[in-house]
Image (spheres, helix red, strand yellow):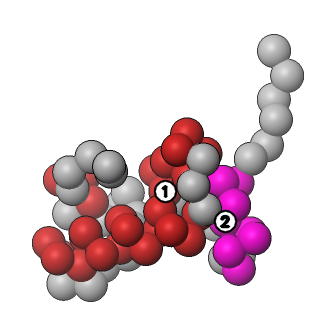
């Protein structure tokens, strides 16, 4: 099996470096949606539950967020 790198559109959205955003990237890839669209949707959902945190799996509130739809 060949490994094919895919950042889910993260770099194209202007993000740089490492962020621990594997869930955001995974959803973008699986859903075929732009990274920024997924990031914004997750950020909005998390902000409603945890006072403005970013969609990062290290954020304990992120784990309790309902599945992305």
Q: In this rendering, would 5 be left or right of 41?
A: right
65 magenta-colored: no
Residue at point 82% right, 35% down? 4
13 magenta-colored: yes
Which one is nearer the viewer's eye here, 49 or 36? 36
User: Residue 36 placed where, x, y %?
Assistant: 56, 71
Whether residue 10 appears in this view of the structure is yes
Spot the residue most to the top: 1
Spot the residue most to the right: 2
Which quadrant of the rendered structure holds the N terminus? top right
Whether residue 22 appears in this view of the structure is no
Q: In this rendering, would 13 be left or right of 61?
A: right
Task: Give the numbered dot on residue 10.
Answer: 2
Residue at point 14% right, 72% down? 49
Q: Secondary structure at mark 1?
A: helix
Mark 1, Cα crowd under 10 Å, few <14 / some 14-19 / many 20+, is: many
Which one is nearer the viewer's eye here, 15 or 27? 27
Residue stretch in magenta = 7-14
Q: Are marks 2 and 1 in contact (CB under 8 Å)?
A: yes
Spot the residue most to the bottom: 52
Q: Main secondary structure of the magenta part?
A: loop
Residue at point 66% right, 54% down? 8
Give the quadrant of residue 59. Answer: bottom left
Looking at the picture, does residue 10 appear above or below residue 6?
below
Give the quadrant of residue 65. Answer: bottom left
Spot the residue most to the left: 49
What separation in Å lies between label 2 and label 1 (alpha carbons)? Answer: 9 Å
Task: Give the numbered dot on residue 24.
Answer: 1
């Amino acid at each position: 099996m060949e490994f094919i790198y895919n950042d889910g559109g993260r770099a194209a959205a202007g993000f740089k470096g490492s962020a621990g955003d594997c869930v955001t990237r995974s959803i973008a890839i699986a859903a075929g949606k732009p990274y920024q669209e997924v990031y914004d949707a997750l950020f909005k959902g998390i902000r409603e539950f945890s006072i403005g945190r970013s969609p990062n799996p290290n954020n304990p509130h992120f784990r309790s967020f309902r599945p992305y739809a």
